[in-house]
Image (tube, coloured by chain):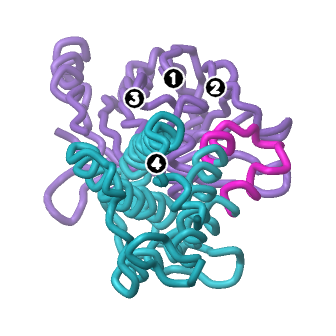
Chain colours: A cyan, B purple
């Protein structure tokens, strides 16, 4: 497996970035649901949101890197065995996943920065608040954050089921390609 | 959110109060609904409700007839921390979607003769109505520089959150919250 994508295979960079995003998305979703239900005296009450924000910003960097890498090294075209409706559906799902991910991360940022406080990233640096003062900004951003994050996870699950369908039912190379084979 | 109690309040004051009673509308530019609660027993956390309205009637010749009504937009809570305010509006605390308003309606007022007074009334918070007593200080009254007449009071009371069905555990030092009303009314 080379670093770059070619006409047949995904390269190491795309494979690594894909699975990093998958891990972060499902991890952040679980962490987010769990941390918002913690009791006040839980040792994770302040630590979990701190982690959630840091990982979230890291994910944003990885997603931006992924989109940039698509320009540097475009992904291989879909396998020839994919039906036209599968190609259209897959392209739509991939585009939606990127769009939703970026929106979820933006709304998360809008919660934490609603009062003008900067967003802290692992204690290493902060991202300044740029948008403040929207009426009940933290509540609106929070509701959208939850709904869209749930949509991302639902869509990503569908995306995974489609890959498994290609692997086990169609017995094609769709899933194997994203494992670098 | 628009609050709409003012018209019925004034109508009620107009019909029920004695003729010489003076009706005041709270000037929200010079009124504050604030609270403080202990954080872990180590410091005081201050907050306020930014949106509220109300009025009172007060007759110097018959102070016992004084009446007060204040309605608070619970979603306007502001503790100078957006993430905390979001949590305070949620079902763990104020549940502002289910209970968008808190209200205080007085039932009795008795002056102690030294500028202080006790104001009894019913406070509705989190959908629970309970009697509370505010320790009131009359601050002052008189003409303002712009042709109006103003009167102001300061009142405090202590609430036990669990009494109002707010039972999220903030620790033993944070079971009570001190509520502070600082109001100035413009005579109508």
Q: Which residues are magenta?
A: A32-50
Mark seen at residue A51: none
Mark 2 touches mark 1? (CB < 8 Å): yes
**Residue at the spot of label 1:** B126
Mark 3 touches mark 1? (CB < 8 Å): no
Mark seen at residue B97: 3
Answer whether residue B63 is visible to the viewer in this image: no
Q: Is A63 situated left or right of A121 in this image?
A: left
Residue A108: image location, x then y, percent:
47, 59
Residue at image location 76% in from the left, 48% down from the top: B38
Number of on-image labels = 4
Mark 1 touches mark 4? (CB < 8 Å): no
- Mark toward the start of the polypeptide (3 vs 1): 3
Where on the picture, by quarter, is residue A181?
bottom right
**Residue at the spot of label 4:** A172
Q: Mark 3 vs mark 1: give the one in front.
A: 3
Protein chain holding label 2: B
Q: Mark 3 vs mark 4: give the one in front.
A: 4
Cα gap from disc 4 to disc 2, whole angstroms: 57 Å
Q: Secondary structure at mark 4?
A: loop
């Amino acid at each position: 497996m080379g670093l770059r994508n070619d006409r047949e295979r995904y390269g190491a960079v795309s494979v690594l970035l894909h699975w990093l995003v998958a891990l972060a998305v499902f991890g952040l979703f679980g962490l987010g649901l769990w941390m918002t239900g913690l009791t006040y005296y839980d040792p994770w009450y302040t630590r979990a949101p701190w982690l959630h924000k840091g990982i979230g910003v890291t994910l944003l960097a990885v997603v931006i890197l992924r989109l940039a890498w698509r320009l540097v090294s475009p992904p291989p075209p879909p396998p020839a065995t994919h039906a036209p409706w599968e190609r259209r559906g897959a392209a739509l799902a991939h585009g939606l996943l990127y769009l939703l991910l970026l929106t979820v991360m933006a709304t998360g940022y809008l919660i934490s920065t609603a009062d003008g406080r900067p967003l802290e990233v692992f204690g290493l640096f902060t991202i300044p608040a740029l948008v403040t003062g929207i009426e009940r900004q933290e509540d609106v951003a929070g509701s959208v954050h939850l709904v869209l994050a749930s949509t991302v996870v639902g869509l990503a699950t569908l995306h995974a089921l489609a890959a498994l369908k290609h692997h086990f039912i169609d017995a094609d190379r769709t899933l194997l390609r994203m494992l670098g084979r | 959110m628009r609050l709409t109690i003012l018209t019925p309040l004034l109508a009620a004051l107009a019909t029920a109060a004695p003729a010489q009673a003076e009706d005041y509308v709270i000037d929200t530019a010079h009124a504050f609904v604030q609270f403080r609660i202990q954080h872990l027993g180590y410091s005081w956390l201050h907050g306020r409700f930014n949106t509220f309205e109300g009025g009172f009637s007060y007759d110097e010749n018959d102070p016992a007839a004084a009446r007060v009504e204040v309605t608070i937009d619970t979603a306007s809570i502001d503790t100078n921390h957006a993430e905390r305010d979001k949590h305070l509006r949620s079902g763990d605390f104020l549940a502002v979607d289910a209970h968008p308003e808190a209200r205080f309606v007085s039932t009795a007022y008795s002056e102690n003769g030294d500028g202080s007074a006790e104001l009894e009334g019913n406070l509705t918070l989190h959908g629970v109505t309970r009697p509370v007593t505010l320790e009131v200080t009359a601050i002052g009254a008189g003409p303002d520089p712009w042709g109006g007449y103003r009167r102001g009071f300061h009142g405090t009371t202590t609430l036990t959150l669990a009494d109002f069905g707010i039972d999220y555990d903030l620790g033993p030092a944070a079971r009570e919250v001190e509520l502070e009303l600082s109001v100035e009314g413009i005579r109508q």
